[in-house]
Amino acid sequence: MTAVSARPKAFAAGRSTYSAVAIALHWLIAILILTNIGLAWYFDDLKGPAKVAPLALHKSIGITVLLLSLIRIGWRLANPPPPLPAHMRPWERWIAKATHLVFYVLMLGLPLSGWAMVSASPLIKTHPTVLYGVVPWPALPFPGVDGDQLHAARKLFSLTHETLAKVAYAAIVLHVVGALKHIVIDRDDVVARMIPLLGRGRGARP
């Protein structure tokens, strides 16, 4: 019984790449987030009916990111990621962990703040959220909140959403720069853990 229960821990400790599920979730969420950023830039200057369709798709993708992120967090808790290379300095480890934490906050905070912002909008009655035009998605309830309070809450949610979006831009740039550093300068296996086709560097575990 002890040997059987020890196998998952030993397997996780010896893993040098992320699991196929973790890799799939990572890239799917990344593609969806980048798509939503592009959509936000696109419909930002649109007015009237022209804005309805891209905004509806933006909301659908946001909710999808939220649901996939919850799955990813659950998977990560059950399946610990591979260890970082031993040659990484303490500050590099700290930045790597902090960046991952920021991304998890963004993956949850962006769609939640967007959902709350839409739910507090008076337009929710005439333009309800329907995921990909198929699945109705409920608005968040605000019991006991009057019109003025709801308007103030919507402004707060909107500010939060916009602030998190700006943080996302910085985090994405930092993430890409860090990945390039590992590929070009360090030449280790950090990025290869998420893109196995890149091959293994000097930081690879035997």
Image (cartoon, grey):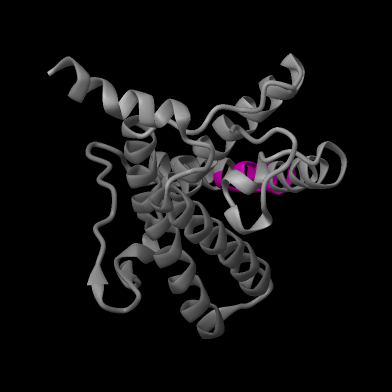
Q: Position of residue 157 (x, y in %)?
A: 49, 43
User: Nearest the camera: 20 or 51?
Assistant: 20
**The C terminus lies in quadrant:** top right
Q: Residue furthest right?
A: 185
Position above or below: 68 against 106: below
Please state, as top left, top right, bottom left or bottom right, where the N terminus lies in the image.
top left
Q: Residue at x 62, y 59 (%)?
A: 197
Residue drawn 80% across and 41% down?
187
Is 97 a magenta residue?
Answer: no
Q: In the depicted view, which residue is nearer to us: 128 or 143?
A: 128
Residue 167 image position (x, y, % from top left) = 67, 41
Picture residue at 47% right of the left edge, 33% below the top? 81
- Is 157 on the left-hand or right-hand side of 137? right
Q: Which quadrant would residue 48 be assigned to in this image?
A: bottom right
Foreground residue among 59 and 17: 17
For the record, the magenta segment spans 161-170
* Residue 19 spot, x, y in % from top left: 43, 46
Q: Position of residue 101 (x, y in %)?
A: 55, 30
Does the stretch in magenta take in 164?
A: yes
Q: Is residue 84 left or right of residue 95?
A: left
In front here: 167 or 93?
93
Predominant SS of the magenta segment = helix
